[in-house]
Image (spheres, grey):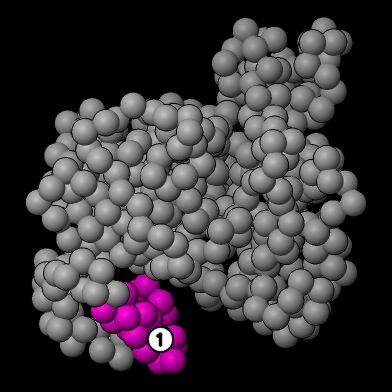
Amino acid sequence: MAKINSLIEKISGGNNPLFHELYGTDATVLKEQADRYASLMGDFEKTYGADDVSLFSSPGRTEIGGNHTDHNYGRVLAGAVNLDNIAVAAANGSSTIRIKSAGYPEFQVELTDFEPNEAEFYTSTSLVKGIAAKMKENGYEIGGFDACIEGRVPKGSGLSSSASFEVLVGTIINELFNDGKMGGVENAIIGQWAENNYFGKPCGLMDQTACSVGGLITIDFKDPANPIVKEVDFDFVSTGFSLVITDVGGGHDDAASQAEYASLPTEMKSVAAELGATVLREVTLEQIVEKIPAIREKTGDRAILRAYHFQGDNARVVDQVAALENNDFHAFLKMVVESGYSSYMYNQNIFDVVHKDEQVVSLALALSEMILKGTGAWRVHGGGFGGTIQAFVPQEKLNEYVKILEHVYGEGTCHKLFIRAKGSIKLDL
């Protein structure tokens, strides 16, 4: 905890080593970030009347390999990115958590009632309640705090704004009441548990882990309670390629579209169940193929195609990591494209069949192939059915790529990102 005036002095202009790690070295960007924190501290003082605070940052994430593999205990390759959610927070000595997010009304969570409530599904309130409940169950101290949060991880962007928010809340409770003793992986597991049980959304653990741990990592979820997280030693900046995430829009919150999204893990698990297993990680492709005639009568063909995608993308992650560790970037790019084709043809999470006339991701992938074929890579990014696509763009094609994609999807929809080393943290300045 430190006085607001002192913190503003320390971050003035953004020219300090921690800001360089989080936001890069562009002087304009660094000043903008410093102003952003200063403004949020001003909002906190106005809203809550206190000036002894801590600063927090939680990154978004980019999924680089393994599309829809985590929820069936597969492998992924992911990285924390330089778009983040930040918070100014302080303990308030009560049993009430009060959070004011920029652009939204304040909400409160009482730490006296931890029952999941279906009426609160799909709300930030439910996530905060679930995180506090699980941390308490795991033996951590919890307490009331005030926080102002400002987010630069766009909702529905495939950069995991919800996971970033979850591990941000976990980090705040961890630092304010537990001296930071909870590890990053446990913070991720708690965030996922809250999303599954209190928010009402089935999800894997990749998003939370990448946001919480930071850097470029590969995660093996074979034992989901103890995922194996390994840092990958590769410098993307040295390749001369930009990682571009384009917000193509689309996606629907109606019940039919929610059911489309939920069908992905459900259908994969239905194939596993026909082979006496719980998830696809417990079976082989050979076992699936041998039983296809019997399985398809029970699950339908799409479930088998999705199982085929899982097996391919799960194995591909190992090869992608090996390619990066061997500095074979071209082999890596080839596998990114293969993963994208598998998502389109077999996993079928590129467009929502309920709204089949809207194919924003399909169109963005076609445009990307037109520009990058033979030189770069492109694929769906994240959950699919709208949201974002990912591309690795060589420097000489960057202006053309951004110009054409923004011509279709709007100015500012292309985000040129880098992988940041820090996960969800309290800023020690």
Membership of 25 in magenta stretch: yes
Residue at x-position 37% and y-position 72%: 22
**Left or right of residue 314, residue 325 in this image:** left
Q: Amino acid at mark 1?
A: Glu
Q: Is residue 379 visible?
A: no
Q: In terms of image quadrants, where is residue 91?
A: bottom left
- Is residue 174 found inside the magenta-colored segment of the image? no
- Expressed as whole percent of the image width and height from the top left, the position of residue 124 reads 42, 48
Q: Residue at x 60, y 73 (%)?
A: 415
Q: Position of residue 134 (x, y in %)?
A: 29, 32
Q: Does residue 153 appear in the picture of this structure?
A: yes
Q: Nearer the viewer, residue 93 or 172?
A: 93
Per the picture, the main secondary structure of the magenta-coloured stretch is helix
* Disc 1 target residue: 32
SS at circle 1: helix
- Please, which residue is most extreme toward the right here? 357
- 171 relative position to 126: left or right: left
Taking depth in this image into account, of 52 and 267 the one nearest to the observer is 52
Q: Residues within 10 Å of mark 1 (few under 14, many from 20)?
A: few
Q: Is 146 or 236 nearer to us in this picture? A: 146
Residue 47 in the figure: left or right of residue 66: left
Q: Which region is colored magenta? A: 16-42
Image quadrant of residue 318?
top right
Figure check: 310 above or below 28: above
Q: Quadrant of the N terminus?
A: bottom left
Q: Residue at x 17, y 31 (%)?
A: 139
The spot of residue 267 in percent (x, y) is 70, 24
Q: Residue at x 41, y 77 (%)?
A: 23
Q: Position of residue 209 (x, y in %)?
A: 42, 46
Q: Looking at the figure, which quarter contains the C terminus?
A: bottom left
Q: Is residue 67 left or right of residue 408?
A: left
Given residues 220 and 381, the one toward you in this image is: 381
